[in-house]
Image (cartoon, grey):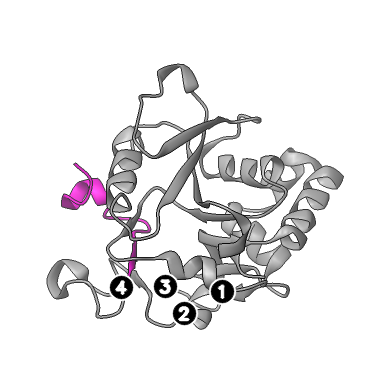
Amino acid sequence: MCWWLMGDLVLHTVLKRSDEYDYDYLEEMAKSIANLSVPVKIHCIHDDLNSAPSIAGVHFIPMCVDLPGWWAKLNLFLQLPGGFIYADLDTVFVHDFTWMWMLGERSYLLSDLVSPELAQSGLMILRRDAIDRVRRYVWMHGMEGVMSRFRGDGEFLHWLLDDHVGRIQDAAPGRVASYMVANVAQNGVPNGASIVCFHGLPRPRMVGWVT
């Protein structure tokens, strides 16, 4: 069964407010998908619902565990056991990306955009079996145990899931581009790419992609 048959298309993201990430990123993401031929809703796990503005197309979900920095992303696994499609807030959708819901029954992580032999978590398509694997490990070792052993969520998920999931770039060649590696500032978005990922510097706000 493909993801199309599971009801509304929902893209998940996580916002833990900081000097680098705030509601402007979420608003930009919502604007970038507002005119798709097939509507996609955004569900945002957020640590501060009292301050959350009303953003068209965005539904806020309270964060269940307050974790530092990028580790907050692990709330996805604690709160969404049935499966999810996820994008970091510094992901920019430049064309229709609903192909992500058509990749079938398998789970996928993103190949690291600089070192593709590694898996990363900037984009994820995860089904229940992969999520259960993460939840079991967290239950057994605790969040402190996870955070003390691994440098970040990407390293943790690569270690735990890489043998059990596919890579998005292998399943959909050319659809994902790195702003930095593809030198989008000078060359433009590569032909065929529908998603531009920022990782490290510059941030989208620095180059006018988030205003």
Where is residue 161 drawn, in percent x and y?
70, 66
Q: Which residue is mark 4?
A: 181
First in sequence, mark 1 or 2: give its number: 1
Secondary structure type for disc 4: loop
Q: Nearer the viewer, mark 4 or mark 1?
A: 1
First in sequence, mark 4 or 3: give its number: 3
Residue type highlighted by circle 1: Leu
Where is residue 190 drawn, in percent x and y?
25, 77
How crowded pointer 2 is (Cα within 10 Å; few <14, some 14-19, many 20+) is rated as few
Left or right: 131 with respect to 207?
A: right
Q: Nearer the viewer, mark 1 or mark 2?
A: 1
Name the residue located 36 percent from the left edge and 51 percent from the top edge.
90
Residue type highlighted by circle 2: Ala
Task: Using the image, tell me which numbered label, if any, was put on residue 172.
Answer: 2
Disc 1 versus disc 2: distance between alpha carbons?
Answer: 8 Å
What secondary structure predominates along the stretch shown in magenta?
loop
Q: Kindly indicate whether the residue at mark 2 contacts the one at mark 1 (C-beta within 8 angstroms).
A: yes
Left or right: 157 with respect to 28?
A: right
Task: Using the image, tell me which numbered label, if any, was put on residue 114.
Answer: 3
First in sequence, mark 2 or 4: give its number: 2
Disc 2 versus disc 4: distance between alpha carbons?
Answer: 18 Å
Quarter holding residue 38: bottom left
